Image: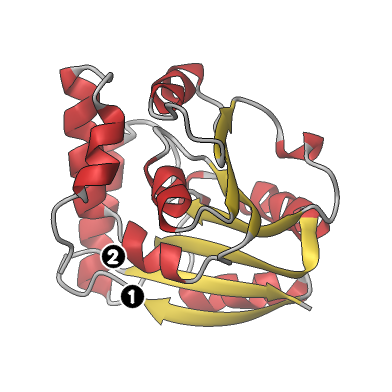
Amino acid sequence: MIGPIPKDLENLYDKANLRQKLYVKLRWRLCPFEEVEKYVPRKGKILDLGCGYGILANLMALKSKEREVLGIDGSAERIAVAKLSIGDRKNIQFFSQDIKDVAPGSCRGAVMTDFLHHIPLAVSKNLFKIIYEKLASDGTLVIQDADNFPRWKYFCSLLVDTSLNIGKPLYYRSAFEWKKTLEDFGFRVAIAKAQKDLPFPDIILICEKL
């Protein structure tokens, strides 16, 4: 069961407005960030792709000072909120930039949370190719997303996503379909279940570069 947001993480958002603070708390309750963090390398440069307000990026930086965390998001508004959380810490940065600008082979890890089912498969495949190039030889990609089974949880997730993204297409695939696609790019993939206490079919894909 996901507990309340850790105080040291919550305190990083003291400069955010009330709406943003409430969003951070809600997002924490709905996404298994602590489970995702456990699979991320403890040292080196870590990319958080689609980092939003930087909740997971901040958690990773707090958990290990030997991580150099780089949060990337296309939304300037979200990056502005994330930057307010940095303070005087040296092991975390946030940018609204393209992953293509990251040097090849320079990252020990990369993470994506609740991201894949919002982009077409062709875009996902291109992203996997780029991430594989950016990862070091011992790098790990960690993905948290939704499975399409069990069906009742899938329909709960679909209902929530559809209501929050009116008029926008969604691209759900099964865990095993994602596993096969990632393996085609050279990753060794393990699947872990997440959030068994909520009505969402969350999974974590742990993808090691071969």
| Residue 155 location, quadrant | bottom left
On screen, residue 140 above or below 169: below
Please tell me whether residue 124 is drawn above or below residue 101 in the rendered image: below
Residue 72, disc: none
Quadrant housing the C terminus: bottom right
Quadrant showing the N terminus = bottom left
Contact check, label 1 and label 2, Cβ < 8 Å: yes
Q: Is residue 7 visible?
A: yes
Q: Residues within 10 Å of mark 1 (few under 14, many from 20)?
A: some
Residue 206 lies, in percent from the top left, at 55, 74
Residue 168 versus residue 155 in the image, above or below: above
Q: Quadrant of residue 183?
A: bottom right
**Left or right of 32: which side holds 206?**
right
Q: Which residue is mark 1?
A: 149
| Residue located 24% across and 64% down the image | 200
Dot 2 amino acid type = Tyr
Q: Position of residue 189 (x, y in %)?
A: 61, 80
* 144 on left or right of 150: right
Q: Earlier in the sequence, mark 1 or mark 2?
A: 1
**What is the CA distance from the residue labelled 1 to the residue labelled 2?**
6 Å
- Residue 26 at x, y = what percent? 18, 42
Q: Which residue is drawn at the image coordinates 33% and 62% (left, top)? A: 34
Q: Which mark is residue 154?
A: 2
Q: Secondary structure at mark 1?
A: loop
